[in-house]
Amino acid sequence: MKTSLIVNTCSLDVLAPKVVYGRCTYRERADLLRDKILPSARQDGWHEIIVAGIFEEGEGYTYVKLDPIYRDRRDALWQRELGARHATGDVLAFSHDDHMFASLTPSLIQQHDPEWDLLVPKRVDCAGTELNNGRDHDYMGGHSLVMRRWLWARIPWTSVDTVWWDRSLTRLWRQEGGRIVFTDSLCHIDLDT
């Protein structure tokens, strides 16, 4: 099973230094991505790493540029969509530029019970405190997730055009027969909380 990690970002957009979301500016997210997230991902054994959106060329990942359209959450959908179109993995993992999968995620995916089409990992802050990932309200939290290629191919990221896309896509993926599993065996860290 080949695993592709797709990280969407607008961190080097010309407006990034001025926009604060969470504890840091989007420009500071570029440092998180460059100095922490990508080095960790390279060590974890992903078959390929794709950064989609507004970032920079670099070693150990493929950069797919996509200029901003809306400068809101909808751009994340287009970035993920473009990243998925470039990915070659059977399994596609998606993450925002301020989230980092915990160690050895590709190995843990392969060891996971095979009865899933979309895995929603536990979400924690830097101190290890558990955060909302949608489980309590039965929707897939969009911060980080892992899905089989077939599900993305049938219901692409751009199937919805709303800032509340995580709830809409959860419904569509379930209607398509996707088995969404919330799991604590996979974890991602929200670095901006």
Image (cartoon, rainbow, N blue to C red):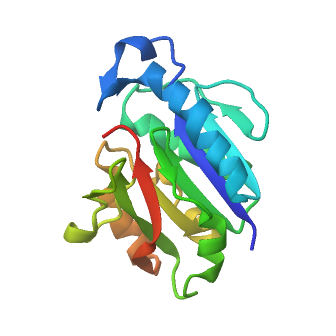
- Residue depicted at 30% across the width and 29% down the height: 23
- Residue depicted at 61% across the width and 49% down the height: 6
Residue 81 at x, y percent in the picture: 58, 47
Residue at the extreme front: 127
Q: Can see residue 10?
A: no
Report the side of 21 relative to 145 (left or right): left
Label tally: 0
Q: Can see residue 48?
A: yes
Residue 86 at x, y percent in the picture: 73, 48
Occupied quadrant, residue 153:
bottom right
Above or below — where is 96 with respect to 159?
Answer: above
Report the side of 92 relative to 95 (left or right): right
Report the side of 37 relative to 85 (left or right): left
Q: Nearer the viewer, residue 25 or 166?
A: 25
Q: Nearer the viewer, residue 156 or 99?
A: 99
Above or below — where is 97 with respect to 124?
Answer: above
Which quadrant of the rendered structure holds the C terminus?
top left
Residue 134 at x, y percent in the picture: 28, 63
Residue at the extreme left: 137
Above or below — where is 90 with respect to 156?
Answer: below
Occupied quadrant, residue 152:
bottom right
Q: Nearer the viewer, residue 87 or 43?
A: 43
- Residue depicted at 61% across the width and 25% down the height: 55
Residue 88 at x, y percent in the picture: 76, 58
Which quadrant of the rendered structure holds the N terminus?
bottom right
- Residue depicted at 69% across the width and 34% down the height: 64
